[in-house]
Amino acid sequence: MDTAPDRTLQNPGSDPVGGPSVLVQPEFIASKENMDSLETALLSLQGRVATKPHTAAIILAGGSGERYGRLGGKQMLEILGKPILTWSAEAFDAVADVGLIVVVCPKERMQEYCYAALDAFPFVTPIVIAPAGELRQESSLAGLNMVGDEFEFVAIHDGARPLVTPALIEHAIAAVRGSVDHDGAVVAYPAIDTLKIVSNSNILGTPDRSAFWTAQTPQVFRTSVIKEAHHIALSDGFVGTDDSSLVERIGGKVALVKGPRNNIKITVPEDYAAVEAGLRIRQRELSE
């Protein structure tokens, strides 16, 4: 497409946020590898939308980035010429069964996110914007409120997890779509470090780590089930650690889908280099 589709804003009257400091990637030492990355920065996954898509995607980009230590958060930090949020959204844009992408971001920064991370790139899938809440759970619900009944499934993803691939998204959707017994599926990776049970700095035991997995995203659910789980949690005043915990709480069955170890979430500054390296490899694969 020559132009990006219009974005539907919840607060169209808000002004763009100025100030260049929050949009600049961390300083790095110039090298041939870094210069070469500029040549591949414009390569993108091919956007696709099926005639009758069954899945909506919610990308949570409302975090403050407090642990990253950067004013304004990390979603707009650039890696290889694109904001972190853009990389995540492009992966969902390349999945034909995703017919809607909902980006949940701070209300006061909607115009900024739309302009810099979405409209500047040739997305094919319709994208709408929803205001983030103070809690991740509130942001998920805000995104779910934008998803209509025509979408049987919904995939919820951390915007700061830009190494997600279309293949992984499709695999997670298929895990739910292909099973009448499961209400959802969570991408996860098996724990690789020795775990300790601790109380007051004292080790109480060493559990078998084979029973423990590190949850990632996307997490895919039947839309009716995840909406019900969120509404019950809201009514009960319950706050879970992720969306799957809400479905588990009401008796839903959630499958586990093994994901790659490198599907990491950028949380602290040292994560940046690892993600940059992974994205550079992907760009080279696209160029071959």
Image: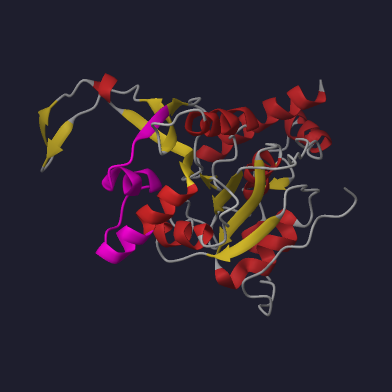
Residue 249 located within the stretch drawn in magenta = yes
| Above-or-below relation of 267 to 257 | below
**101 or 264, which lies in front?**
101
Magenta range is 231-256
**What residue is shown at x 36% (from left), y 53% (from top)?**
229
From where the camera sits, is residue 249 visible? yes
Figure disc tally = 0
| Above-or-below relation of 60 to 258 | below
| Above-or-below relation of 56 to 274 | below
Q: Position of residue 83 (x, y in %)?
A: 67, 49
**46 or 248, which lies in front?**
248
In the drawing, does residue 223 fall left or right of residue 113?
A: left
Res 203 quadrant in image:
top left
**2 or 98, which lies in front?**
98
Residue, far bottom: 13
**What residue is shown at x 79% (from left), y 57% (from top)?**
5
From where the camera sits, is residue 77 visible? no
Residue, far right: 2
Q: Position of residue 139 (x, y in %)?
A: 47, 60
**30 or 214, which lies in front?**
214
Q: Position of residue 198 (x, y in %)?
A: 14, 36
| Quarter of the picture holding the C terminus | top right
Res 236 quadrant in image:
bottom left
Residue 171 located within the stretch drawn in magenta = no
Colour scheme shown: secondary structure
**What residue is shown at x 42% (from left), y 50% (from top)?**
226
Q: Position of residue 268 (x, y in %)?
A: 47, 45
**What residue is shown at x 35% (from left), y 21% (from top)?**
192
